[in-house]
Image (cartoon, rainbow, N blue to C red):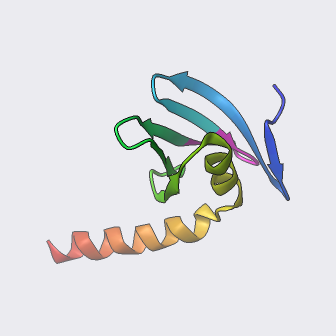
Amino acid sequence: MQAIKTYGHQQLRILEVHQHRLIVGRRPEWSPCSIRYYPAIGQMLIRGPEGQYIGWADNLADALTQMAITDTDKVLSKSKRLNRKRSSDI
């Protein structure tokens, strides 16, 4: 299967298609990320491989661009710290 979008070292590939949701793999690991369309507001929510928030987009091209250029390692490391802090507070 061929990559659909390439930015620097990042490549994206559509892995699954569901109603109002795409599962997109990010290279090099092909970690599954998701793009979910919300028809009521006409926008797409983009989430990283661990479910972390990447952003909102008005169209599929913008969603794929955001997914390709986002450094999910930085976003994920923040999420892990927050999760540890929350679990220790309980």
Q: Position of residue 37 (x, y in %)?
A: 46, 37
Observer-nearest of 63 and 30:
63
Determine the residue positioned at 79% across, 43% down.
5
Q: Position of residue 84 (x, y in %)?
A: 33, 71
Residue 3: quarter of image: top right
Q: Position of residue 2 (x, y in %)?
A: 84, 30
Q: Is residue 16 above or below residue 32?
A: above
Q: Is residue 85 above or below residue 59?
A: below
Number of callouts: 0
Observer-nearest of 83 and 59:
59
Q: Is residue 61 magenta?
A: no
Q: Position of residue 74 (x, y in %)?
A: 58, 71
Determine the residue positioned at 44% across, 41% down.
42
The stretch of residues the image draws in magenta is 25-33
Q: Is residue 13 above or below residue 67?
A: above
**On-image quarter of the N terminus:** top right
Judge left or right: residue 56 versus residue 10. left
Q: For the view shown, which residue lies furthest in the left direction?
A: 90
Judge left or right: residue 17 versus residue 37. right
Determine the residue positioned at 74% across, 46% down.
27
Q: Is residue 26 magenta?
A: yes
Residue 88: quarter of image: bottom left
Observer-nearest of 68 and 29:
68
Judge left or right: residue 65 versus residue 11. left
Determine the residue positioned at 61% across, 48% down.
63
**On-image quarter of the C terminus:** bottom left
Q: Is residue 58 above or below residue 79?
A: above
